[in-house]
Amino acid sequence: MTYDLIIKAGHLVTMNASGEVLSDALVCVKDGLIEKVLTPESAEPAPPSGEIIDASSSIVAPGLVNAHGHAPMTLFRGLADDLLLSDWLFNHIFPAEARHMNPENARAGTLLAAAEMLLSGTTACCDGYFFEDEVARAFADSGMRAVAGFGMLDPVDGTDPMKNVEEAAAFALKLKGENPRISPSIFCHSPYTCSEKTLVAAKRETKRQGILFQTHAAETRAEREESISRHGKSPIAYLAGLGLLDPDTLLVHCVWCDDEDIKIIADTGAKVAVCTSSQMKLASGVAPVAKFLAAGVTVGLGTDGAASSNSLDMFLEMNLTAKLHKVTSLDPTALPARQALLMATLGAARAMGLGEVTGSIEPGKRADIIVLDPEAPALNPVYDPVSALVYAASGPCVRHVLVDGKIVVKDGKITTFDLHEALKRVREIARSIKGA
């Protein structure tokens, strides 16, 4: 067989079931699929290839996977900082969205987010927002892989929220056949902005279509206290009582979860996305990641939207998460580098329903791969490639990025769209926001 592409990897971090890190390996790609991974011990001659990427001095790893974000909100980066979540959301972000978010701006913000993620080694993300048809198209145009969640919350004007569910259903049905890299989802903002009727109807629709259901849950202490006051149970128990938790449910944040909540999540098979930098910046708290993992819960890392975290760099997210859980437990062995990397690759992919597609470098997976720059000072010397990725690397250390076997970043430059024009449009929007 002649392959479309072969990557010669000096250090290949596979994130396969054995957690192998291979030296001097070949990754053979055909039609966007990883067909073979060869090592010097494979006793096979180097196969013919149409293109060769010589990364023989580099760390090669799975593309990072961002388990939660709101791509268009890059337009609000730095607009409202140093605030509690309730103040940030209700007094700043919701009003800004009402004034400035529209389909055109959602596309512009998504292209900005895609550029930031791709240039920092993220090849797939799970999104949830409004105007998600434009978001999905922008992700498709960028070359990224994405789960696009149709966002909804109950209208404050009293309009029947079932119209949102009907629109979400139509969105998902239409998106399913458009692009194999873009998967539909339904994203209910939270149990405190969506009624029981909305939550149940949305989940029923995701079950009918076999797609992911997403919601924020248990993000702050105030949310937990309000849920107990209103429903007599925690946010997690409330959602479980409505029949919303199953293996196709992604719960985002899950900071304020007690042991019973963790047991509910584990027993139902629901997945969790933790957004450390956002939760730190909003002072929401520290998610009980170690307890989730001990209970067998699948946990993925996400950045959240740039309006709250300010950065979409998953290297930063891994670094912060590993160190935060060490210092809060006073245990340097807590959340080791390999676990942090797993949560930013295969764990995140599993959390968003793409575990069979991406998140590791092994035969049968799509070729979503990053090549680190061997000349990056922060990546020298390399004794342990996993340690280097989690504790030393940052977005600018990424040299090449492939999605579906196609080069979408080459030598640190986006190849799929005109970044200069995208940035020009974002600056125009920012001027209008600032002048409002």
Image (tube, helix red, strand yellow):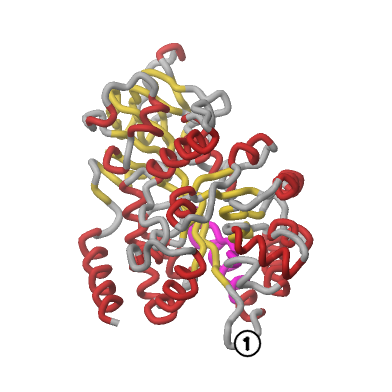
Q: Position of residue 222 (x, y in %)?
A: 60, 63
Is-magenta flag for residue 230?
Answer: no
Depth order, front residue of 193/328 = 328
Location of mark 1 (residue):
158
Vertical side of 340 occupied by 70: above or below: below
- Quadrant of the rendered image containing residue 135: bottom left
Between residues 18 and 418, which one lies in front from this camera angle? 18
Residue 81 can be seen in this image: yes
Circle 1 crowding by C-alpha within 10 Å: few under 14, some 14–19, many from 20? few
| Looking at the image, residue 241 lies above or below residue 357 | below
228 sits left or right of 327 in the view = right
Q: Can the viewer see residue 32?
A: no
Q: Residue at x 37, y 47 (%)?
A: 313
Q: Does residue 247 sit above or below 320 in this rendering?
A: below
Q: Give the range drawn in magenta.
A: 167-188
Q: Quadrant of the N terminus?
A: top left
411 vs 139, left or right, is: left
Name which residue lies at 27% across and 51% down: 415
Quarter of the figure that contains the C terminus: bottom left
State the SS at label 1.
Answer: loop
Residue at image location 52% in from the left, 38% down from the top:
328
The residue closer to the viewer here, 353 or 153, is 153
What kind of residue is marked 1?
Answer: Gly
Image spot of residue 358 (x, y percent): 51, 41
Residue 181 within the magenta-colored segment of the rendering: yes
9 above or below 213? above
Image coordinates for residue 261, horizontal then vertical, percent: 72, 50
Q: Residue at x 41, y 47 (%)?
A: 123
Where is residue 20? Give x, y as percent.
49, 22
